[in-house]
Image: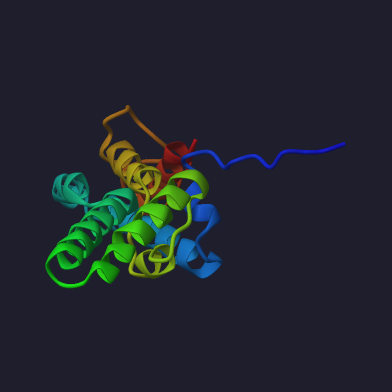
Amino acid sequence: MLTRSRLPATSDRVPLHTSVSANRAIARRIEWSVRYHAAHPERIGQRLAKLDREWDIERVLEANAAVLTVTGVALGVTRRTGWLVLPLMVGGFLFQHAVQGWCPPLPVLRRLGFRTVAEIDTERYALKAVRGDFGPIGPGVYDADTRAAHALQAARL
């Protein structure tokens, strides 16, 4: 019997095509931030504002593709037509990313720490939980580390 390969869910595409070490580094960064802010709740508002401005991996890839496409077309029109191969390749890689979740710049960008919307939201909702936006969580306010663990667990549900 023939089986069709399933395309990964949108939220899973990028992490599935990212190295284990890069995924772990991103997860550690999220956990560190939540634990740090659980111990320093007065800084949560600033961190949330910064998260609102953070570019996710999709936005970075789209901007990268747009710049390379415009550059390739401009060089192809003004210099040599061979440059028109660049936007063709970029378009193909962008389509590949849309379907599979992988493209050539992805490993580099992930190692640089660019995160998915889901990863940014995990940190965001964990910080909001620590701050008390959703009601009380875990142990008392003086046990910041355990509160951070509870908030991370809730945010990942």
* Residue at left offset 29%, top offset 70%: 82
- Whether 43 is drawn above or below 4: the answer is below
Where's residue 98, x and y in %? 43, 45
- Whether 148 is drawn above or below 75: the answer is above
* Residue at left offset 35%, top offset 65%: 109
Where's residue 106, x and y in %? 41, 62
Q: Nearer the viewer, residue 56 or 37?
A: 56
Q: Nearer the viewer, residue 41 or 16?
A: 16
* Left or right of 72 in this view: 153: right
* Residue at left offset 38%, top offset 70%: 108
Q: How is the image coloured?
A: rainbow
Where's residue 94, x and y in %? 38, 52
What is the quadrant of the N terminus in the image?
Answer: top right
Q: Nearer the viewer, residue 138 or 18?
A: 18
Q: Residue furthest front?
A: 81
Q: Quadrant of residue 66?
A: bottom left
* Left or right of 77 in this view: 157: right
So how many labels did they put on this image? 0
* Residue at left offset 21%, top offset 72%: 80
- Whether 22 is drawn above or below 38: the answer is below
* Left or right of 1 in this view: 103: left
Where's residue 124, x and y in %? 30, 43
Q: Quadrant of residue 5?
A: top right
Q: Residue furthest top?
A: 135
Q: Quadrant of residue 122?
A: top left
